[in-house]
């Protein structure tokens, strides 16, 4: 009943509004831009006098959709999201897609992945998703102004094709996962197992494609099962095993900084088998020219 009352309130708002302020790109203005990168694919449309609409797909993370705005025109609360009929078939009925939270700030609307995917499908079908919300501070003689923010499907399909091509080249893991990773080793061993090699292959792919990498830090460690001298040599062998793989795969030697620490800097207790297993490791940290990729 509460949901029904909210929808009735929106329809009352629409029918009794003093004036609906509409923001949408006209047919001759409607353009979709695609930004390609191995860590994200982004598709956007300018909404004149309002801001922009963005579909953003980060590597290894859920799809994002959000609106950015130059000014606060929507009041906080629940906006109605509808999908309007294609311009070439105005007789088709609008579709209700639910209620969306509106917040003050540079991103008044942000929606979750499932609904973002639904918006892509609506646009591909030629429909125009529209957000309807009460305007900020506009109550005159008991009547309230409404704000309509709509996406245009004009020129969407060509951009969507480019967007899908970008998705096909996207890294399979997130920036955080790439930034700092860890390989574990068996006792007294420095050889790379299949799981380690698979992950290193992913890192090599990123290093070669990114083009902005400044340094690759490789740090070797052990547990405390042996003497400090033995452990230092073993940690060096483990770090060099990773370095050798990178060099064999064509990573430039001047990018790599190799360090080995033996049993120093444990990340878990060496008093039990589980802790010692965590300490037998090599960490790989990537640093870019414009951005240090770290996970703290």
Image (spheres, rainbow, N blue to C red):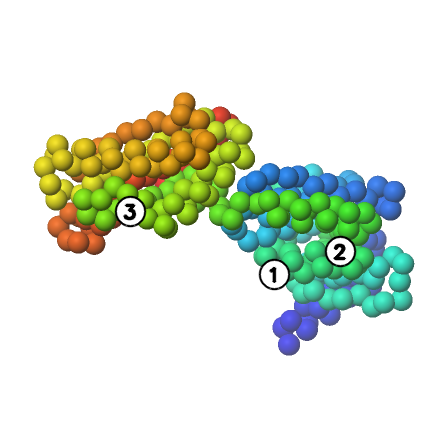
Q: Position of residue 208 (x, y in %)?
A: 51, 34
Q: Is residue 53 above or below residue 265?
A: below
- Give the residue pinned by disc 1: 114
- Label 2: few (<14), some or many (≥20) within 10 Å? many
- Residue occupying the point 18% across, 33% down: 232
Q: Looking at the image, is 177 positioned above or below residue 208?
A: below
**Mark 3 or mark 2: which is in front?**
3
Q: Which x, y percent locates residue 159?
A: 74, 46
Q: Secondary structure at mark 2?
A: helix
In the picture of the structure, the residue carrying the numbered disc 3 is 184
The secondary element bearing badge 1 is classed as helix
- Whether residue 56 is visible here, answered yes or no, is no
For this view, does 191 lie left or right of residue 170? left
Tell me which label, 2 or 1, sits earlier in the chain. Answer: 1
> In the rendered structure, which disc, 3 or 1, sits on the residue that comes first in sequence?
1
What residue sits right under mark 2 in the picture? 123
Residue placed furthest toward the bottom:
1
Which of 200/61 is in front? Answer: 200
């Amino acid at each position: 009943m509460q949901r029904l009352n909210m929808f009735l309130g929106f329809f009352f708002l629409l029918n009794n509004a003093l004036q609906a302020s509409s923001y949408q790109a006209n047919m001759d203005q409607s353009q979709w831009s695609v930004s390609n990168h191995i860590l994200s694919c982004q598709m956007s449309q300018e909404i004149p006098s309002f801001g922009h609409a963005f579909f953003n797909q980060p590597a290894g993370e859920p799809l994002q959709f959000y609106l950015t705005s130059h000014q606060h025109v929507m009041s906080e609360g629940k906006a109605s999201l509808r999908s309007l009929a294609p311009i070439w078939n105005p007789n088709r009925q609008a579709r209700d897609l639910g209620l969306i939270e509106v917040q003050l700030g540079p991103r008044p609307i942000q929606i979750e992945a499932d609904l973002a995917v639904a918006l892509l499908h609506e646009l591909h079908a030629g429909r125009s998703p529209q957000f309807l919300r009460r305007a900020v501070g506009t109550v005159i003689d008991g009547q309230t102004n409404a704000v309509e923010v709509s996406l245009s499907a004009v020129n969407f399909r060509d951009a969507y094709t480019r967007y899908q091509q970008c998705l096909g080249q996207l890294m399979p893991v997130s920036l955080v996962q790439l930034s700092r990773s860890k390989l574990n080793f068996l006792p007294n061993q420095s050889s790379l197992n299949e799981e380690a090699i698979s992950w290193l292959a992913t890192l090599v792919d990123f290093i070669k494609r990114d083009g902005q990498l400044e340094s690759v830090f490789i740090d070797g460690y052990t547990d405390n099962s042996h003497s400090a001298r033995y452990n230092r040599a073993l940690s060096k062998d483990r770090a060099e095993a990773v370095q050798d793989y990178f060099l064999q795969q064509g990573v430039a030697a001047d990018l790599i900084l190799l360090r080995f620490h033996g049993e120093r800097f444990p990340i878990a207790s060496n008093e039990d088998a589980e802790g010692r297993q965590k300490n037998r490791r090599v960490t790989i940290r990537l640093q870019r020219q414009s951005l240090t990729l770290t996970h703290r």
